[in-house]
Amino acid sequence: MVEVNANPEPAQNMTIYINNLNEKIKIDELKKSLHAVFSQFKKILEVLAFKTLIHKGQAWVIFEDVTSASNALRQMQGFPFYDKPMNYQCFATQRIHEKNYPTHDLELAAVVFVLKIWRHYLYGFRFEVFSDHKSLKYLFDQKELNMRQRRWLELLKDYDFGLNYHPGKANVVADALSRKTLHMSALMVKEFELLEQFRDLSLVCELTPQSVQLGMLRINSDFLNSTREAQQVDLKFVDLMTTSNDTEDNDFKVDDQGVLWFRGRICIPDNDDLKKLILEESHKSRLSIHPGATKMYHDLKKLFWWSSLKRDVAQFVYACLTCQKSKVEHQKPAGLLTPLDVPEWKWDSISMDFVTSLPNTPRGHDAIWIVVDRLTKSAHFIPINISYPVAQLAEIYVHSIVKLHGVPSSIVSDRDPRFTSRFWKSLQDALGSKLRLSSAYHPQTDGQSERRGRSNHWKIY
């Protein structure tokens, strides 16, 4: 590959022709044509003035460009257009700590590098430095500098120069040097390494002068085979597989490999090992990075289907030790605990709870409804059946509590479905009682009802 910067039209056309010759791999024709063309090309290059002699007393102009891979410098002279190149410099190796520099410091490091390698040209003379990083223009006016920039300013103050902004698209030479591609020899080394890796995979490789032809690689997953074997053992899935293709509108389909699918998702049978494999792969692999239960469920339900998928995902994430140790809670703090107000009159504020799972009585009662006065600690133990509807419980409440003690101003209870139902809330709103439900997983709010229920439970047994 031939590259010539700022060359006239004859040399430019010649480079295009030489580059086109590289595409023709016939060696004999290439040798004859290339020898004649290259001889003529050398004569043209001898006429061109790529580098001129240094003139003392003339100002210097330096163009620099920095990329993540390399830095490029161009030194120019020739007043007033500065069109005579003196030196070119391109260094592609950055030290390890320089790779962590921000862009501003990388550009400034290139300026420092210029002053060090061309000190014998620049020291004692006025020169200008052009960079495509605009913030360097205001370096000497910054109020706050980091320690690295302060150290470099100790070097910069010994030179008489100015920092100027030059757009990157106008700085074509330095930009081309900083983005210089790898040599063709390096590419060939990578190519042969790649071919060896493909040969290790037992692929058929054929190397031609212009291309590499490879055979098709097909990877069969053991997961589908394991899934098919597990489906054939599960009786429920066997029935679905036999009736899956009876009608076209059936959501269950069997593919050519004998695997059952449900609406484009693989059906996973009741196999603990198979489910564990899927959950671990989607939660603990390097690509998943321990997602939460909600995200993990939405990702899995696009690919797999089984009846208890959401519950299994929630239990798996909750049992993950890494998530429990390192995950940060994003919920708003619950705040400070506040005690309940002390009632001013008996039966003005009550608490209630259910004691369930008791032996059946001759009248069919299997639970006790405990209602406690928060001031006097007196209580009513009302026998009920746990299957009573809310309307019947409301009738018992009016007959056993309201008729004897009046309507309370507040009722403290847990979040039992009966106490959170719309019927119960509407009833208390109509009576003028305020419901004070406890927090979730915090039974200490209604501690006296819990304690009364425990004591009563001991008495029964």
Image (cartoon, rainbow, N blue to C red):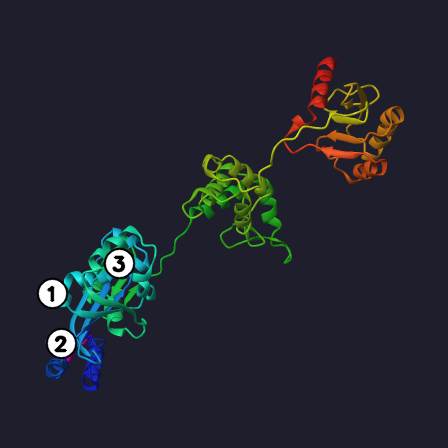
Horizontally, residue 206 falls left or right of residue 412, namely left
Q: Label 3: which residue?
A: 194
- In this picture, is 259 found above or below 435? below
- In this picture, is 154 found above or below 126? above
Measured as percent of width and height from the top left, residue 278 is found at: 48, 43
Local secondary structure at mark 1? helix
The picture quadrant where one finds residue 88 is: bottom left
Eye-nearest disc, 2 or 1: 1
Determine contact: label 3, label 2, CB under 8 Å.
no
Measured as percent of width and height from the top left, residue 160 is found at: 20, 66
Residue 414 visible from this viewpoint: yes
The picture quadrant where one finds residue 354 is: top right
Q: Amino acid at mark 1?
A: His
Determine contact: label 2, label 1, CB under 8 Å.
no
Measured as percent of width and height from the top left, residue 4 is found at: 19, 77
Residue 367 visible from this viewpoint: no
Q: Residue pushed farthest bottom?
A: 10
Please give the name of the residue rendered at 65% of the width and 26% of the height, measured from the top-left corner.
Answer: 444
- The mark tally for this picture is 3
Q: Main secondary structure of the magenta part?
A: helix
Q: Label 2: which residue?
A: 51
Q: Is residue 325 magenta?
A: no
Magenta residues (range): 25-30
- Residues at marks 3 and 2, CA–CA distance in whole angstroms: 41 Å
The picture quadrant where one finds residue 445 is: top right
Local secondary structure at mark 2? loop
Q: As rendered, which of 203 and 413 lies closer to the eye?
A: 413
- Residues at marks 2 and 1, CA–CA distance in whole angstroms: 18 Å
Q: Label 1: which residue?
A: 120
Local secondary structure at mark 3? helix
User: Counting residues from the N terminus, which is met first, the one under dot 2 or under dot 1?
Assistant: 2
